[in-house]
Amino acid sequence: MSRAPLWRAVAALAVIATSLLLALTMAPRLGLDLRGGTQLVFETKDSSTVKADADATDRALDVLRRRADALGVVDPTLVRSGERRIIVELPGVLDPREAAAVIGKTAQLNFHPVLGPAEDGDKDAVADESGQKLKLGPVALSGAGVTDAAARSDPQMGPGWFVTIDFKEPGPWRELTGKAACAPVGDHKRRVAIVLDNAIISSPQVADSVACDAGISGGTTQITGSFTPQEAQNLAVLIKGGSLPVPLDLVEQRTVGPTLGADAIAASAKAGVVGVILTAVFIGVVYRLVGVLAAVALACYGLISYAGLVAMGATLTLPGLAGFVLAIGMAVDANVLVFERAREEYGAAPRRGLKAALDRGFKNAWSAIADSNITTLLAAGLLFWLASGPVKGFGVTLAIGVLASLVSAMLITRVLVAALIGRIGPRASGIGSIGRVRTWLTRRDPDLMRGRRLWLAVAAGLLVLAGAGLVTRGLNYGVEFTGGRIVEFGTSRPVDVATARQAVADAGFPSAVVQQSDDAISVRTGQIGADDVVRMEEALDRRVGEVTKQRDELIGPSLGEELRRNALIALAVALAAQLVYLAFRFRWTFGTAAVAALFVDAAVVVGAFAWMGKPIDGVFLAAMLTIIGYSVNDKVVLFDRVRELWPVRRGEPFGRVVNTAILQTVPRTVNTGLGALFILAALAVFGGDSLRDFAIALLIGIIVGTLSSSFVAGPAAIALERRTTQPPPAPAAPRARPVRRDGSGAVV
């Protein structure tokens, strides 16, 4: 007797127990779009003396990390991305002005003697804190000589704050202050200028207690003045952080309020619960007992996916949440494939019993399941490789979901079904018949491929319609692809969009695009600064009532162009990767037909968004690559069945073989599509604006992709097969029967 069922049960129990332990003991790492905060992306630039390579970027990263630590941000994240970019995540920091101004200061930190007031026309003069132009002497001490700086207050010294500075060597500071002390009290020459980014950040006067040429000894000094606590802290951060080896450009900035993140988590959770319940009820009604057991396995799938996310330390972003919810619907696919094959096996040989039919169903469905999941993993890998920001999290979540769905369907569902299938009858099991849809199709046997030219003409018409949308309406590229700034303000009461538009214009931005959705106002402009955003917020406060900044994204023009280019590359590579994989696994004709159908799917979705004026952004890119991965699953299942039928029906026309394969796979295609549509409908209703557009794109893509499998990929494959000289696949060689022996075979 085989021990495989026992080992499968042990493995399933171990996976569930480990996942439960991880889920209970580890907390997820939330992205800034879910917990609130600011993300800054800096790009290093070449200076006159230093090239901005990976080594210089790493040294700049160390300086930024010291500055972030000195700011007192809880759990900041700073990483190098590529060779010249640095990503800085500051949880809880909702004012990007302060963060970018303090962390991203670029120039050398130096200490200069003050030679006196500058003459008119002196190009080298530098303004002090009060705006007076000063003439500075050569650098006496660089920021590399500073070991520490801190903001302090001491009641014994009176009210106010001061900054202490510690130096590596006391000599240079003692010499600089000793020379300055020779000037009379109140004279400009008695001051020391601390210069950062070609601007004086402080120019304290040497105390009158310091003797000429004696200077301040001990390697420590204090800068006093009328500092507020925040001013003292910022000054200490800049001095302690030291100099950056190369200049930095701020190319991207995202700020999300904590309330918006909490609302997104609640909305995604609600969408997930509703979608899972609808999917579980649907699969239970269609497949009865095995469907109910598959629903239990889906719950285990959710646990395994979540445990995988926290175990990997993956950052869960808002698109990642959408991917987590969506993958639940996609996890139904493997179960449906197995159950449909098991129904066929039982209908062909009912005497073998339910258990044998299910075993053969799992075995025969494995090829299509493996191929369809590999194609989805290709799309997830492209998202992680070419996307940026939160969309990367979607790629990670989707990949983990695909792997977890394999474990859920091929291991847990199989163990549950094997434990109960022998105790019930065929009707209650759900696999005792091929189903009403399949029975009706078998009885009617419609020849769908007779009108294949009509179907291809309809597909061509859809392409023309999509192209017309692109030409007449154009694409509404989001700020992520064009560069610029988009700010979203929450309102305390309903606001007329015309009033909001006038308020933004009065603030100095007449060309800004102002839109209203639910209880929020979004403003999209070109490259404006953080101070401009504050002015805009104040204008809205005066005209429409109290507003709260919920989201603030700034994308530099170079980064926007790069992201747009990467999006096109991602789509092209996705189609090429599917073509290569399908040609390798099947035939080049099948691969070409599948990619042609995928192109129609992608074009229809893009054209629909052009006609509706929906934004084309990173979330849309995630939706498009998911559509390609999901749609190709249908093509894989269809051509897997064609590959199976063709060798045993070599006497039939190839078009008839394709027609039969379509009719046999329709139940799987429809049931899988409905499982995903339940999830997407829940996301569209409960998921908020950004997830609603994501869900709409996928709804269109899955509906079109389901139809294109039969009415584009099938006819295209028939047309291509007429133009190839490659022979049909040969029938599989029959297995040799084992030789029956009389007696034991022993020799005495």
Image (cartoon, rainbow, N blue to C red):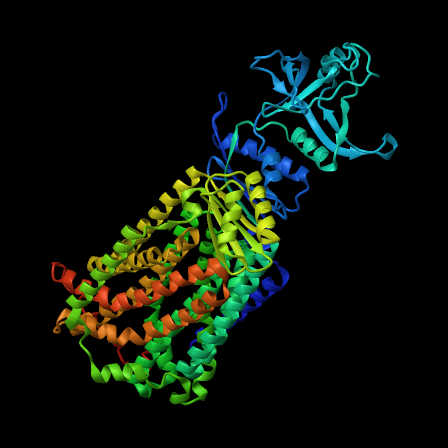
From the viewer's perspective, tell me whether residue 547 is left or right of residue 702: right
State the image coordinates of residue 475 (x, y, percent, origin top left): 34, 50
Q: Quadrant of the N terminus?
A: bottom left
From the viewer's perspective, tell me whether residue 724 is left or right of residue 285: left
> Would you identify the image quadrant in which residue 467 lies?
bottom left
Residue that protrudes farthest toward the right in the picture: 156
State the image coordinates of residue 51 (x, y, percent, origin top left): 47, 26
Q: Quadrant of the C terminus?
A: bottom left
Residue 3 seen in this snapshot: no
Q: Please state which of residues 42 and 720 is positioned toward the viewer in this rendering.
A: 42
From the viewer's perspective, tell me whether residue 724 is left or right of residue 432: left
Above or below, 511 against 58 in this view is below
Above or below, 187 against 86 in this view is above
Residue 592 seen in this snapshot: yes
> Would you identify the image quadrant in which residue 531 lies?
top right
Number of numbered discs visible in the structure rendering: 0
State the image coordinates of residue 350 (x, y, percent, origin top left): 32, 87
State the image coordinates of residue 128 (x, y, percent, origin top left): 66, 22
Q: Please state which of residues 647 and 337 is positioned toward the viewer in this rendering.
A: 337
